[in-house]
Image (cartoon, rainbow, N blue to C red):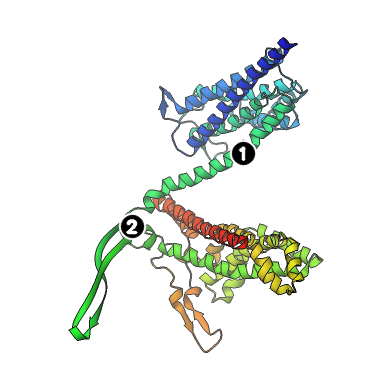
Amino acid sequence: MSTQNELVKEGNSTLDVAALVLSGGALVGALVGALALFEVFAITDAVAGLSVARWFGVLLAALGLGTLGVGAASRSGLVRSEPDRTAGPVAGAVFGLVGFVVGGLVASQTLGLGTLWPVVAVLVAAVTVVATVYPRGDVGATLPSGLLALLAGTVVAGGVVAPGWSWTPIEGSFTLNADIAVPLLAIAIGFLVAWMASRAYGGFGTHGKQSGAYLLVSASAAGMLLLLVLLVSYIVVRGWAPMTEGVKWGLFWANWTYFYVPPIDRYVIIDGPVLWFHWPFVMNGYALLNDVNGIMPAVVGTVWLVLGAVLFAVPLGVGAAVFLTEYAGQSRFTALVEVSTNGLWSTPSIVYGLFGWAFLVPRLGNNQSILAGQLVLGFMLLPLVIITSREALMSVPDAYRDASAALGVGQWETIKSVVLPAAMPGVTTGVILGVGRIAGETAPILLVAAGAPFPSDAPNVLSSFQLSTAPPFVTNDALLQATSALPYQLYAVITAGVNENAGLAWGTALVLLLVVLSFYAIGIASRIYFRKRLEA
């Protein structure tokens, strides 16, 4: 009996090691594919005498052979395993879809079957589903994924899909080249092979399915974080040089101030260190004589648009949430408002822009203006503020309200002094999410607020306020003028010809990213402040 237990332990250990090696190799291939997709390196770069594309093919072929070998070893009894009766319907559906795509591409592009390709695609999908679901779990998990990886590796390593290869599915449509196709193959097949190979960990049985599910969840979370890092890094790498072009700074000794002293009939001059800083891309406008054309008017316009939207939407949204939660209670009216706010938050931004263009612009001087943009963005922000503020208020324990009422405090004083401070971290989170959305919107700004795409001066809102004796008693002509904004400027640069203005486009994108992140930082700092104040 002890000998049998030792054999079972040894067999399972061998299978587990093989599963870990295959899963790790597949995930590494997917990671390298993502790096190649974001141009960290090119597939034409040579490594040990072979191009990166060929190495991708070799890796995929090796993964395919390894996966087939693990399945064959389990099926033949060379290693001990406890496979289920079938690989499961989820695996069958996934590989059926893969079979449909592969069969359709081969039939339409390679064999040139024309209108018959759907029939071939359906037949290949059906065969793939049967090959996945009908055999034992070990064969069904490894056979389709191994053959797919082996086929893709052979095609790439054999030079069929190599640097210089391109494919246009429909004349005049997009063109897929090897720089994108090879990394995408490495990512997609890497995840499939890792998923199926992880099922071998524990013997293809229930434990194997749990391992596969755990790997999928973990890989998805890691993939999202990696995608975020790669996107931000890609923008930073492309936009850093144009954004920092011409930056100058210095520390020198200069006059701080001076004043006249009558008794000695002399001027007294006070000197001190002065820090000088010049950032042309952010501090300049767009002009013919500038050494570096900048986006300062767009930055200022974005700040005013977002600030006005926040000042408009946050008080209304929080007030509405307080009324719905603390006074209206659970009623048909509350349910109607909840459905309406959810629908408004899901409404496309272009619809808000059309509303502003048709309703607000004619009533605000019939011109595109900062005020119209602030109101439209405020309408977009308002539903999310109501939703998140309501959830934050509802999450405040009723014990807080009961304790305040037991002390004889009125309802409004309880809301103001107890409920709202406890809900402020959640309210701030909702505002952060909303600001992140409206700061990057282009369609509403294009319709209701956009002026010249490359202005030379920023809107001077602060110094334009004037008091008058006639309603509305306070006027500001700058708010009724059109402005630029970072999303609109980026759109204008791209439509003007991104090949000629690529540096300006990437620099603008990086500044927009930094502006949004700065709004996030302010919101996070506010949330931390309110949370510490609540805990104090």
Outermost residue on the bottom side: it is 469
Residue 523 screen position, x and y as percent: 55, 60
Picture mark count: 2
Vertical arrangement, residue 351 with respect to residue 235, above or below: below
| Relative side of 225 to 130, left or right | left
Residue 191 screen position, x and y as percent: 61, 32
- Which residue appears at 45% of the width and 65% of the height? 300
In this rendering, the label closer to the viewer, 2 or 1: 1
- Whole-number angstrom distance, CA of label 2 to CA of label 1: 42 Å
Question: Which quadrant: the N terminus?
Answer: top right
Q: Residues within 10 Å of mark 2 (few under 14, many from 20)?
A: many
| Relative side of 390 to 168, left or right | right
Q: Of label 2 and label 1, which has the lower sequence position?
A: 1
Q: Which mark is residue 292?
A: 2
| Relative side of 418 to 477, left or right | right
- Which residue appears at 56% of the width and 70% of the height? 372
* Residue closest to the eye, 455 or 45: 45
Question: Which quadrant: the C terminus?
Answer: bottom right
Vertical arrangement, residue 401 with respect to residue 88, above or below: below
Residue 287 screen position, x and y as percent: 35, 63
Q: Amino acid at mark 1?
A: Ser
**Residue 118 appears in view:** no
Q: Which residue is mark 1?
A: 220
